Amino acid sequence: MAEAPHHVTASPAPGSADQPVIEVHDLRMRYGSTDVLKGVTFRAERGEVLALLGPNGAGKTTTIEILEGFRMRSAGQVNVLGSDPAHGDERWRARLGVVLQSWRDHGKWRVAELLEHFGRYYRPYSTAEISRPRGTAELLDIVGLAEHANKQVRTLSGGQRRRLDVAIGIVGRPELLFLDEPTAGFDPEARRDFHDLVHRLADLEDTTVLLTTHDLDEAEKLADRILILAGGRIVADGSADQLSRQVSRKTEIRWTRGGQRFVHSADDGTAFVRELFAQYGEEIGDLEVRRATLEDVYMAMVHRHESGVAGDDEPGFGGENR
Amino acid sequence: MNTMLFALRLGLLRGWAEFRQTLTILSELGSYLLNSVIFVAVLLFMDGNEMENTALFGTGITQATLAMPGVLATMLVFGGIVSMAQLLSTDREDGTLLRAKALPRGTQGYLVGKVVSVSLITLLSMLVILVPAVLLIDGFQFTVQGSLTLLWVTALGLLATLPAGAILGSLFTNPRAIVGVLVLLLMGLMMVSGIFFPISMLPEWLHWVAQVFPIYWLGLGMRSGLLPDTAVVEEIGESWRTLETVGVLGAWALVGLLLAPIVLRRMARRESGSSLEERRHKAMQRIG
């Protein structure tokens, strides 16, 4: 079947201006009598990479599924690319990318054949600015599956399947990409390739990315902004650096002098180190200057909320640093 | 451009691709055609057995001649209801449907694709019986009108069964349970629907049970297309009852086509990553 390119005449896409790509206000979700989300508020600007962290069961997946339009919320305002996901139409859907955790679906399809087929769904939604879909050869190249193009999906290794999941997620050249634990099961090399890909999407194509992960190191490397979800609320929202300042303003400095190890905690690390060198110069060895890591921040924030110190009705740290 | 029409076209492509995959994967093809091959063997085994104690004794119509159209009907119902239900529920379990849902017009494309691929496989499974049967078994009568009858009965049969299969596949989440229950039910219906022996040999109350379901009417319709008119004597009312056949199959089709979109929409709406994850855990527990 030959396909003439045809376009749904697109009125200027809502949300494409300077409006935030994601705007969530007081989002609530209740399952039976359990409140999973108790008022989640955050926003994402165009081209931003956001990492959503939180303990298991905190509601990360629920939040993402609501934004994807796969789950109805109990209350609150949600706006994704200018539409309410609960009523998002097909044109809205065409602007989203969803990377799903695959299991064994489409096992009989060949890799290139599947990408080609899925790409066709996006063809009517191609616009002057964004040509959809992305070509199969380009996709295979981006995710490093070129040599497996003619393999049946079921013969791929776990890591290769994950790459295919990512390729399917970006086949429609999405303006907003959702990644739910994208690198689970990746080896270190695949992980690094994946990080490069996310940077590339965000920097070159202005794609907004929302990802969940348990890997704090990954969140720190990838995300412009980190959200920590605990106790049904966003308890922290900011860059890794901003968050570490929230938890502790102190910097830890370690060094050796004359065969002895020293540790000192200072409010102004830079000044302390300058002082240190002024006093001892060449004698200083093995210098380490370390601000609170994201792990420290995460542990502190989550612990604070799980132990109830922050109280149930306190708004938490969300938004304080903007 | 109407994106709905576009989705329809994608569905046709998808269905054709799925059908081709089934053809090229031997184990897959084998599992679909195994039933057909068994039925052909059974028919050949029955060939030459006269219809003793019936009005058809000595007419040249043997047990195999009489049973073959009914076997075609059975294959159609197996394909349209059991395969459809099984595949739909398997596709929900393994995430195929969720993946389709993430695409614009993806759910529609998926469903059209499923209807196309299941129809093609069902037709193939019928051909695998029809071709050797007409070559090896005597007593059929081939006319243009009869062939047309086979075609419309098959088409109407698919319309009557596919929506029912889709509804069952959406209502039940465990594909293995669906197959078990439906196969048993279908076997029972086969016994009372005059597939392997004339329905006139059964008590009348069973006639009423059989006449509620499409398999009896499909068998009747197929017989009317393949058997000489002399064979009509063992049918209810000694008539092919074409109008009634259209009526009952049409009613199944109509009700199915009205209900299926509602049930399917409800099912598709509930698909999400976490519901998939739950089913994956359950399935893993069953396997492990």
Image: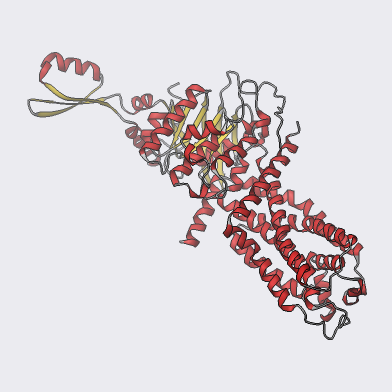
Q: Name which residue lies at 51% across and 50% down.
A: A154
* Picture coordinates of residue A240, whole percent (x, y): 38, 27
Is the C terminus of chain A in the top left, top right, bottom left or bottom right quadrant? Answer: top left
Name above or below for residue B165 compared with residue A193. Answer: below
Of the pair B144 and A296, the residue shown nearer to us: B144
* Picture coordinates of residue A171, whole percent (x, y): 57, 33
* Picture coordinates of residue B83, whole percent (x, y): 67, 59
Residue B21 relative to residue B263: left or right: left
Q: Name which residue lies at 52% across and 36% down.
A: A167
Q: Name which residue lies at 58% across and 41% down.
A: A113
Can the viewer see residue A314 in this picture?
A: no
Q: Name which residue lies at 61% across and 62% down.
A: B30
- Image colouring: secondary structure
Residue A86 relative to residue A179: left or right: right
* Picture coordinates of residue B241, whole percent (x, y): 91, 67
Of the pair B99 and A270, the residue shown nearer to us: B99
Q: Residue furthest bottom?
A: B53
**Image quarter for residue B231?**
bottom right
Of the pair A120 and B211, the residue shown nearer to us: A120
